[in-house]
Amino acid sequence: MISDSHVITATISRFREISGISRSRIYEMLDAGELESVHVGARRLILIDSYQRLLAKLKAAEAEAGNRQHPADPAHAAKG
């Protein structure tokens, strides 16, 4: 049996459970190219690594936005 940490694809239903994202939002993300999928027969499988890349991209964007909102104060940095 393969553990969840080794899953490389997921059906739309399973991806909903994993991510907590609604079915309609998943399809929007697929259409926008934010998530990648493959078809195996009639099944559409989400590539989990595309979700992991999206999360990393979102996390980096949040960090960058936080840095812009709270620039380092040189006076405090010198004391640190």
Image (cartoon, helix red, strand yellow):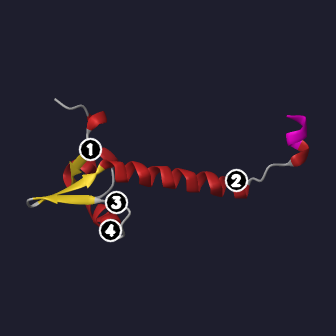
Residue at left 25%, top 59%?
A: 37
* Number of numbered discs overlaid on the protein picture: 4
Q: Hey, what amino acid is under mark 3?
A: Leu
Numbered disc 4: secondary structure: helix
Residue at left 35%, top 64%?
A: 29
Q: Hey, what amino acid is under mark 4?
A: Glu
The x and y percentages for residue 39 are 16, 60
Q: Any mark on residue 67, and which?
A: 2
| Residue identifier under label 4 | 28
| Residue identifier under label 1 | 8
> Rounded to the nearest whole Å, what is the CA distance between mark 1 and mark 4?
21 Å
Numbered disc 1: secondary structure: loop
> Rounded to the nearest whole Å, what is the CA distance between mark 4 and mark 2?
29 Å
> Rounded to the nearest whole Å, what is the CA distance between mark 2 and mark 3?
27 Å
Numbered disc 2: secondary structure: helix
Q: Earlier in the sequence, mark 1 or mark 2?
A: 1
Q: Give the range drawn in magenta.
A: 76-80
Is residue 19 on the magenta stretch?
no
* Between marks 2 and 3 in the image, the one whose residue lies nearer the viewer: 3
| Residue identifier under label 3 | 35
> Rounded to the nearest whole Å, what is the CA distance between mark 4 and mark 3?
9 Å
Q: Earlier in the sequence, mark 1 or mark 4?
A: 1
